[in-house]
Structures are given as C-alpha cells and as structure tokens.
Amino acid sequence: MSSKTVVVIGHGMVGHRFVQGLRERDVTDQWRIVVLGEEQDAAYDRVGLSSYVGAWDRSSLALAGNDYAGDTHVDLRLGVGAASIDRDAHVVVATDGARVAYDAVVLATGSYPFVPPVDGHDGDRCFVYRTLSDLDAIRTTADRAGTGAVGVVVGGGLLGLEAANALKLMGLTPHVVEFAPRLMPLQVDDGGGALLASLVTELGLTVHTGVATTSIAERAEASEAEALRVTLSDDSHIDAALVVFSAGVRPRDEIAREVGLPVAERGGVLVDSGCRTEDPEIFAIGEVAAVEGRCYGLVAPGYSTADVVVDQLLGGSTTFGGADMSTKLKLLGVDVASFGDAMAATEGALEVVFSDPVAGTYAKVVVSDDARTLLGGILVGDADAYAMLKPMVGSAIPGDPSDLIAPSGGPAIGLGALPDAAEICSCNAVSKGAICSAIADGACDVPAVKAQTCAGTTCGGCLPSIKKLLAESGVVLSKSLCEHFAQSRSELFEIVSATGIRTFSGLIAQYGTGTGCDICKPTVASILASTSSDHILDGEQAALQDTNDHFLANLQRNGSYSVVPRMPGGEVTADQLIVIGQVAKDFGLYTKITGGQRIDMFGARVEQLPEIWRRLVDAGMESGQAYGKSLRTVKSCVGSTWCRYGVQDSVGMAVDLEKRYRGLRSPHKIKFGVSGCARECAEARGKDVGVIATESGWNLYVAGNGGQSPVHAQLLASGLDDATLVAYIDRYLMFYIRTADRLQRTAPWLESLEGGLDHLREVVVDDSLGICDQLEAAMHAHVSGYRDEWSAVLEDSEKLKRFVSFVNAPAEADPTIDFDSSTGRKVPVLLGSPTVPARS
C-alpha cells in the first residue's frame, strides 16, 4: 500500500512524463499519484497539434500509456482542475469540490497563449492555438467561411507558423503578422528569416513583418469569408474570416500566486535547481517552472525538470543543470534548425555563412574568436547537417569551419570525432558515450539502442545520428526481410521478376530457409500480386494472406467485417445508392461516409459477404480494396465541371486514375488526390500521389502521407498534359513498388531513397537509369490484366467455400458476434463486454 500521495496538477506532455518516470522508478510503490487534468483528453502530443487537422482523430495524438490502464497507483481525473491548495492542511481542492490530501504537489500547469490587448481581440471569430478544442473551434468557423477564405495569424514564431500551417490544411489562405522584422525571431537571424519568408510565401502564405495588429473589427453585412477587418500599424488592412493569436505564451502560475508562492519577475513559479518552490512540499515542472528565475518553453527542458522531481521524491539529489534550447523542425515542408549560440551573442564570436537563394538554403555556423570551437548555428531549407553539428557545440572543430556547411559536401567530419560527452538525444539527455556503451554491450540495431538508452524515443530527430554511430561502430545493419530470407523486400521483388517464380514454396526453397512466418508470407504474397494479375486467392497464394486479404474485407473489432465498394472519383449513380441502402437495410449494416468519398458498410458476418457482394456486383460496383495494401481511393473536388474556380476536370481525371490503378498491390496502401485548382479542396498534397490543376496543365506531387506522422507531398513535375501525367505516375508507382521496404509508405520510402526527390525526378522524368520503358510496361500489364477480385470469387465455387464462420458447420452464424444499438448507432460489442464502448 502506498504510504504517500503526490498530486500532479496538469496532464500535458511534461506532467505525463513525470507520472511515467515516477512509476518506473518507484519500485517499492512508495507513492500514490493523483493527476488533475483540466482537459477532457488525457496527455497528447501538443507539439504535433497541426497533425490533428485533416484526420480530426484525437486518439492519433495520444501519448503512449496516457490512461495508466491497470495501474492502481495512479488516479487520473480528466476534466478536473485544481481550484486551490490549502498549504496548512496539505490538501488540494479540485474544481469538482473533491479534497485530496497530499504529501507533495507537482505543478505542471504549463502555459497559456498570450493575446495582445488590441481592440476586438475577444470577438467570436478570434481564437488561440493551444488545444485540440481550440482547433475544433477554428475548424467550425473555417468551414463556414469556405475554401480560400483568409485567416490571419498574429505571431510569426514557431507556434505562429504551426498555426498558419493548420489554417492552410483547413483550406484557408493564411496571412502571418509578426511585429519583429523577421519570422521566427528567436530562432533565426535576418538572413535565415528572409529565406524562410521567401520559402513559405511560395507555399501559399502571405507574410507581414515589422508591423503590429492594431484593431480587429467586424464588418457589417459582409460574407463569412470577409467578416473581419484586421488593421495593421502601417495603416494597411486584411479582410479575413478569422484571427488566430499565436504571439507567445505565459506561464500558468495563477494558483501559485493565490497561495502566496513567489513567482519570477516575468511570470512562472520560482523554484530552485531541484525544482522545489519556497514550500518544500510543492514542486513545479515544465513551462510553469521558473528555474532560478528562468522559464523554458520547449519540451526537452520540461522533461528534464520532470526527471529532476522524480529523483527528488525518491530521495535523490539530481538538480536541473540548464537546458538545450536547440530546435529542429519542418514548418510547412521547410526545414528549420537552430542550435547553440545561434545569434552569435558570445563576445568575439565569428559567423560563417553560406546563402543560396536559388537552391533555397541558408546555413550559418558561429565559432569562437580563434575559429577553433563551434558555438552554434542556423540552418534553413536544408537541415541535414543538424544531426552532426548540434552535438559538436562546445567542441573543437577538426578543420576549416566552412567545411561544416560547405555546399559541396556538408559536414566533412564523422560522429567519431565527437567527444563521448556530446549530447546526441537532447529530449532525453543521452550522450554519444551512452549510446556507444549500449552498442558495445550488444545493442545491434536502432530498436535495441532505443530500449537501452531511451535515445530516439521522443521526437526522433536523433535517429540518423544513432544509425551513423551503429555504422561507425562496425555494426552492419541487417536488410534481411526476416529470419527466413536474408534478402530485403526489394531484392526479393527483383528475384521474383527475374526468375518467374510464382509460389512462396518455390521462392523459399531456392532463396530462403524454413517454412516462413507472418512477416515473409504476406510480403511475398504482395510481391506476387504486384508482378502478375493472378487472383489474390488463387492456389498457394490464398494461404499467405493476412486476415483482411484472406476474406477480401476489413476485419472489425468484434469479428465482423466491413464492405467498401469502389466509387471512382466519388461518383455513384442513384440506382447504386439505392442498392447500397437496401443491402445495408437487409443485412442490418451500419453505414458511414469515409474520408475517401466512399460508403463503408459495417457489421457483416463472414458468411454474408458473398451475398452482399453479389448484389453490389450486379449493380455495377466492384471491390474498393479497402482491405488491401493497394490503391485505396482517388479523392477529388468537383473541378471545372461544376466549380467556378476550377481550371481542369478533376473528377474526370480522378475517375481515370482510379480505374487505371485499381487493384495495384504495393508495399503499403496508396491514396491519391486530384484538385481542380490551387484551392486544393481534395487535399492532394497530403496523399501518396497528388495532382493539382493549373491553367497550364497538371502539377504532380508525390510521397505525401496522412496517418500518425503526416508529410506533405513534394512537387515532382509541373505543367503536365494528361498523357505525360499518367506516364510519370506509372513510373513513380512501379519504381516505389520495386524498391520500397516491407510496409513502407511512400513518404518514408522517399526519405530513405539515396538522393531523395532529385534522384526520383532523375529516374521518373529524365530516365537516368534507362528503366522507364520497363516501368511503364509493368504498369500496362497490370492495367490490361485487372479483374475485380469479388466478381472472380462469385464465379468460383472453390473460393466461395472459404466464406464460412465454422468449417464444420457452414450454415451457422458466429454466436460471438454481437452489436448494440441503444445509443442510436449500431456499434460492435466485444465478447464478454458488459457495456457499449464509449465514444471518444
């Protein structure tokens, strides 16, 4: 039984880090933890807030283990804050009236957005950018305003540009207003700021620097898109739909002030190096903590303060020794990094600068007055050198400082030249020496290094350095698919293509060992499907598939399946809609419009699938392959056919592309988007293939991904006619299918491709490898050999035999599958579950 109670006020990233750290290190269960979190959501990745836009899935940002499920020593209370602290009685009074006795309190209240007191700042169309609920509110107004409406962001720092990115993803046209003479004034200098402004302007932002916002007024009888007039200090104005304030943050120290705890001159709870306040039983961590009078607004220093308090509560003496304020991030697709003394504040510091506006890069290193020690630097447009340079801060430079950022070769040194004390992972304060020790102790790959040192487990920015340390230590990183195949997926693809082997057994007999596993079997099945038009359930192939492909449907949480007919470009006839509705009604299916412009029908039992598909096929529909690692959807806007802004027929192109690439099996799922103009209603730049219409033709973007780590697609070619566009997509997709690793989406594939986008352009556009004819021929073979998978199943009595709940009782339905409709929505009920799962 825990003998002491610590109350944590706040459940953000740092508060969660503290709870996890205490539970991991408190091996004798000394402490019971009560967490008060004001928001309804448990701790989530606030740094990645803009990734919430588009998916609108709160769970995708949830931090691992944030509900402390099954841990009886943690009492998490969401939607409940702290009203006051009775220091004499040692009680925290919660906002719901509960009184929690404590032995220690940890203030993890973070910060709140600063809103300048300009006239009109408190209007209904003015927002801050801090929480998921803030984004929901912004979205509501943005949707009313419509695509292309202007959104003004007040503040051009890190958070301001993130907010501008979020508005752009919502379909708005962002304007950024920054009082300083450059963007990101705390991170980059004038040269870097000028390039950054140029790069983001090319990406659709309008930047106003050196001006302030003086007033915000509602415009009577104006449209939703121009409901506000934002006046700037130079007497110019912007007519906009909404305003987002992202002009910095202030520590949330009000509860400390109320109970008489000292605060710093500029805010924040005053704490010593042990993060302890004037009251020895009250601590502060993260953005609210003013350690020796200074607040730190980044995650890494916040994590350090959390670790310090964990150690203090367990009887240790660890103190906070300062913080690394280096940053590396990608803003609107533009790399930006700063580290060390980026502004050359050190007396006598020298600056070495390389600026290439044509290439869109700016690099600066700051060195000591004798040019022997690296003090800091700034990188804009290309931040690849950050992983090497940042750990070198404070170390001797082995050579000419200009070699560190020379355009010809980048850093001319290796990580081996760094001292062991150099910090590789700033998020978790892991040194080069600690990583090398882990490697010497047997950590032979990145996951093993992560497990032993925690390096690379937070932002992931140090992973390239970890891989280099592994390589420089003589560790050969295996490319083996699994224990049964020494070859990589791309090597197996070439073997299958060259030898004509059409079975898993034949491939493993000649090129592998053993009988295979759940890694190599579906991978080989995918390769076989990508290199022929054989049915996915023909012969030996059928036994290799995972559950979804095994039954050509998506398995749901209670053992039922969902059915998704294909609707190229989102088009569907009235008769087909009637059939879908009747099928859903007859089989009691739950229906939902998907994000890919299709209709999903949930709740089908496996034995019902053939009859459902028979009726859909008879109505002219075919499989949408929602279950496969293949083309999913081609999303489109209505284009020039209907829209007054459209410049090309995006629907017609989307239909043509979906019909061409349907059924194409690949290392991972593929999604397309086709937008009829630059307003981008189809969100094409978040797709593996994005096509955007212009007056002069089609622009082709590649390797964008949604999901857990969203990535913007990059421009491969512009001004293309229809035939050239299709040829380039053919080549790009087949090159990806040939060379990608198992379950590797296009964004990480392009990132790992040596030479990156430039190399891909050379292969696909310039035919530098001389393989474009092969790639196009392979795609032609797929297109000409395509046949709907479900139609083929319905015509094959042997394939139909697999669609039963029980092999020995084919007529019986699975009794473990059940549903609940008490909420008005049909939802699955898990076996043995007494209640309906709550809506998140």
Image (tube, rainbow, N blue to C red):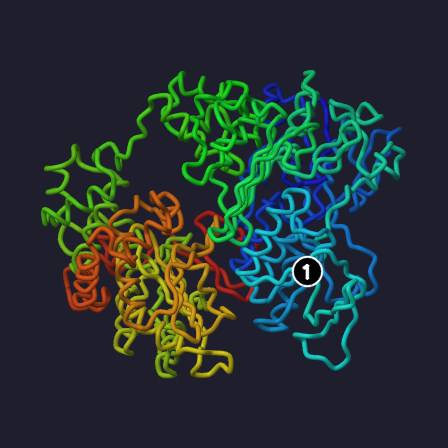
Q: Residue at x 67, y 53 (%)?
A: 156
Task: Establish if 564 lies above or below 294.
Answer: below
Q: Is residue 508 left or right of residue 481?
A: left
Between 834 and 112, the residue placed more toward the observer is 112
Secondary structure, mark 1, is: strand
Task: Establish if 441 lies above or below 145.
Answer: above
Crowding at mark 1 (Cα within 10 Å: few <14, some 14-19, many 20+)? many
Label 1 sits on residue: 208
Q: Is residue 132 left or right of residue 442?
A: right
Task: Establish if 252 lies above or below 528.
Answer: above
Rendered-image quadrant of the C terminus: bottom right
Residue 25 occupies which quadrant of the picture?
Answer: top right
Between 512 and 184, the residue placed more toward the observer is 184
Q: Position of residue 703 (x, y in %)?
A: 39, 54
Q: Residue at x 23, y 67 (%)?
A: 788
- Please give the count of numbered marks on the rendered protein: 1
Is residue 575 something one can see in this rendering? yes
Rendered-image quadrant of the N terminus: top right
Q: Position of residue 38 (x, y in %)?
A: 72, 46
Q: Position of residue 803 (x, y in %)?
A: 24, 59
Q: Is residue 21 left or right of residue 659?
A: right
Task: Establish if 560 lies above or below 75.
Answer: below
Q: Position of residue 152 (x, y in %)?
A: 68, 63
Q: What's under tag 1, amino acid-wise?
A: His
Between 751 and 419, the residue placed more toward the observer is 419
